[in-house]
């Protein structure tokens, strides 16, 4: 009988620790899953635009809808998606040719954008001769369990893609 009581006391001491570890693991896995979806959303958004020679307002609406579905089962009402065409300035950087957004703020047309080294090397890209598509995603993650992540965690990612069928991608409105 003493051993039965000892086992109950040991379980009473270790049970809450195990429950806490389980809940923490569940919340961490949910957060990692949401972050992976944000990364996939960024690459898919840039890739869908990079496959065309021009996009219209209807195309952008369709692209925003399609890539938003990637976030399922997480809520998509607050995801911010910005897709921009960055044209070479001839010096290794770029300027915004056009920028469209869903729930966010678009980049200003003709504003300068710093580009990672090598994406638009000035030895290859003369002014206006090449471009890249930049997709930027911002997602305020709220845990469905909310035991450890009690506040919103802002997740974000960006992705660059080169146009496949033309040097630049036009926006036809």
Image (cartoon, grey):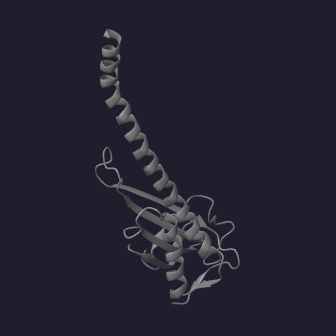
Please provide percent x and percent y for residue 91. Answer: 58, 67
Query: How many labels sit on residues?
Result: 0
Please provide percent x and percent y for residue 145. Answer: 34, 50
Please provide percent x and percent y for residue 56. Answer: 55, 87
Taking 46 as reference, is 33 above or below it? above
Asked whether the viewer can see residue 91, the reply is no
Screen quadrant of the N terminus:
top left
In the image shown, does 99 or 130 lie closer to the viewer? 99
Please provide percent x and percent y for residue 157. Answer: 48, 59
- The picture quadrant where one finds residue 125 is bottom right
- The picture quadrant where one finds residue 154 is bottom left
**81 to the left or right of 15:** right
**143 to the left or right of 126:** left
Asked whether the viewer can see residue 20, the reply is yes
Taking 73 as reference, is 126 above or below it? below
**56 to the left or right of 31:** right
Residue located 62% across and 63% down the image: 119
Q: Farthest residue to the bottom: give it.
A: 173
Residue located 55% across and 70% down the image: 45
In the image shown, does 120 or 6 lie closer to the viewer? 6
- The picture quadrant where one finds residue 47 is bottom right
């Amino acid at each position: 009988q003493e051993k039965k009581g000892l086992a109950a006391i040991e379980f009473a001491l270790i049970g809450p620790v195990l429950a806490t570890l389980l809940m923490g693991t569940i919340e961490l896995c949910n957060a990692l899953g949401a972050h992976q979806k944000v990364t996939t959303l960024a690459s898919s958004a840039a890739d869908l635009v990079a496959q065309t020679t021009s996009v219209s307002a209807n195309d952008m609406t369709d692209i925003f809808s399609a890539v938003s579905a990637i976030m399922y089962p997480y809520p998509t009402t607050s995801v911010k998606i910005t897709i921009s065409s960055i044209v070479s300035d001839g010096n290794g950087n770029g300027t915004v040719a056009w920028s469209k957004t869903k729930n966010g703020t678009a980049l200003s047309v003709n504003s300068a954008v710093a580009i990672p080294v090598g994406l638009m090397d000035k030895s290859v890209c003369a002014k206006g001769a090449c471009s890249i598509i930049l997709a930027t995603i911002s997602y305020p993650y709220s845990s469905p369990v909310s035991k450890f992540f009690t506040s919103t965690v802002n997740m974000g990612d960006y992705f660059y893609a080169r146009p496949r069928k033309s040097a630049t991608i036009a926006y036809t409105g």
